[in-house]
Amino acid sequence: MQVTITVNGESWDLDVAPADVLLDVLREQIGVKSPKIGCERGDCGSCTVLLDRRTVRSCLVLAVEVEGHEVTTVEGIGADRLSDLQELFITLNSFQCGFCAPGIVLSATELLDENPNPDRHDVQEALSGNLCRCTGYEPIIDAVLAVGQRSGEVTP
Amino acid sequence: MVIPHDFEYVRPNTLEEATRALADCSGSAQVLAGGTDLVAWLRDDAVHPDLVVDIKAIDGLRDLAVADRTMTVGSLVTFTDLMESSVVAEHAPLLSEAAETVASPGIRNRATVVGNICSAVPSCDAGPVLLAYDAHVHLVGPEGFRSVPIEAWFVGLRQTARREDEIVTHLTMELPTHGGCYVKLMRYGGEDLAQAAVAIVVDDAHDYRIAFGAVAPTPVRAHAVEDAIRGRAPTEDVIAEAVAMVRSEISPINDLRATAEYRAHMCEVMLARGLVAADQRRNGDGPEYRTRLI
Ligand code: FES
Ligand code: FES
C-alpha cells in the first residue's frame, strides 16, 4: 500500500504492507534509529515515539494507521539544539547504556508539555511504562524534576 | 520479529462502509481501534485475520458526554480521554479511577475502553467498573443496531457477545448519585495487570453494585453480596457478612502473578476497605478519587 507519513516534519511516500509495524518502518525504511526494538509487545517503552504529540508504542502501531498523522522521534526534538531536558540528562549523567533513553526523553517531553512543573509522583507515573535496566531510575527522575524547577525560575 | 501473516487493511469513513466490509469478508476479520492488544496478538500469531478494519476514521465514535444522567462513551474513547475529562471525573469517577491504573501513558493514549472489553481478558480494568455502572454495549451489524447489557457481554475467557460482523459503536450508563471505588491489586505501583480488582457503586438508598475482576474467566458481578447487604450502611457487621460471601462469588486461579488463595484473601480485604471508602465518598468525606486504597 502507498502511504504518506510525516516523520519529524518531513513527509515520506512509502510502499508498506498492512502487516508492517511502525517501529520497523521507521528504522528500516526511513532510517530513523532512535526508537529501539525491545520487547515488541508494549511492555518496555523503548520504541516510544510521539504520534500527534502524544506518546505511543511504535511496536503496537501499524505503519498504515499513521497515514496523515505526525510522528516525532528524538531526532526531531534535538535536531537544532538539545532541549533543556536533554541537557539535564547529560549534566546529571542520567543514563548508562542509553538504550532506554530515546523512549524516556519522549515520555518526559510529553509530561513536561502538559505539566511544566511536575512532582516526583507525576514523573514516576509518566515514566512507569519505560523500563531501564541500568540506572535504578533515580538520576532520570532527578533530571526531569530539575527541568520543572528551572521552568519555575523567573528569567530577568 | 514481524507479523507472520499478511492481511488486507481498510480504513472506512462511515459505519455503513465498515459493516459492509466485515459482512463482505469471506474469511475472518478483526476490528482495529487502538491496537494495543490486536497488534500484539497479530505478532504472536494468536489471531490471523484476512482483513483488518480500522475504525479510527469513522466520525461519531468519540463521544464522551452526559445527558439526563446517561453517560455515553464512544468506541474510540481512550483511557487518556477518560482521565482528562472533567465530565467523567464528576459523573462517573470510577472510570477515571480505573483509567489511571491501566498500563502506562503510552498505552493509555492509544488503548480504548471499548477495546478493553472487546479483548475481554479476565483482568481488564474496564470490566468491573462497567459492570458496577450497569453499562449497555451498543453495536451495529448487517441487521442494524442492537444493545447488550454488560452482564450478557462477557461470555467466556476472551469471549464476548459481539458477533464477528458487528462493530461496537458506544457504551451507555445510567448514573445514579453515587459513591464508589475501583480497587486494583498489583504487584507494584506503576504498570501492571490486576492480580485482583473490585469495583463498588453505592447510592443514597445503600443499594450496592459490586463486581470483581481477574478472579474468574470473566469480570463478575456479585449479586448475592449486593442482595445480602442492600439498604444497610457498611457497618462492621454488614462488612463481615459481605466478606463472608466473597469466596462463593469468585473462582480465582493460580498463575504467575498471584496464587488463588492470595487473590481470594485480597478480594475480601479490598471489599471491606472498598465498601467503607465508597460510602464515605458518597457522603463527600472519603479519600479522594484516584487515591489508592490498597
Ligand atoms: S519494543 Fe515497544 S514497548 Fe517494548
Ligand atoms: S541506561 Fe541502560 S537501559 Fe536505561
Image (cartoon, coloured by chain):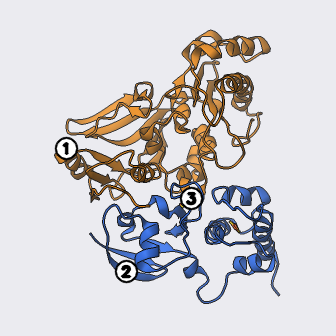
Residue at 69% of width from left, 62% of height from top? A132
Front residue (pair B78, A87): A87
Residue at 53% of width from left, 38% of height from top? B124
Q: Secondary structure at mark 1?
A: helix
Q: Which mark is residue A12?
A: 2
Q: Which mark is residue B23?
A: 1
Q: Secondary structure at mark 2?
A: strand
- Going from the N terminus, do you reach mark 3 or mark 1 first? 1
Whether label 1 lies within 8 Å of ligand 1 gets the answer no
Amino acid type, mark 1: Ala
Per the rendering, the colour in which chain A appears is blue
Whether label 3 lies within 8 Å of ligand 1 gets the answer yes
Amino acid type, mark 3: Gly
Q: Residues within 10 Å of mark 3 (few under 14, many from 20)?
A: many
The residue where tag 3 is placed is: B106
Per the rendering, the colour in which chain B appears is orange
Quarter of the picture for ligand 2? bottom right
Q: Residues within 10 Å of mark 1 (few under 14, many from 20)?
A: some
Drawn side of residue B278 relative to residue B132, left or right: right
Amino acid type, mark 2: Trp
Q: Quadrant of residue A47?
A: bottom right
Q: Secondary structure at mark 3?
A: helix
Per the model, the C-alpha gap separating discs 2 and 3 is 24 Å
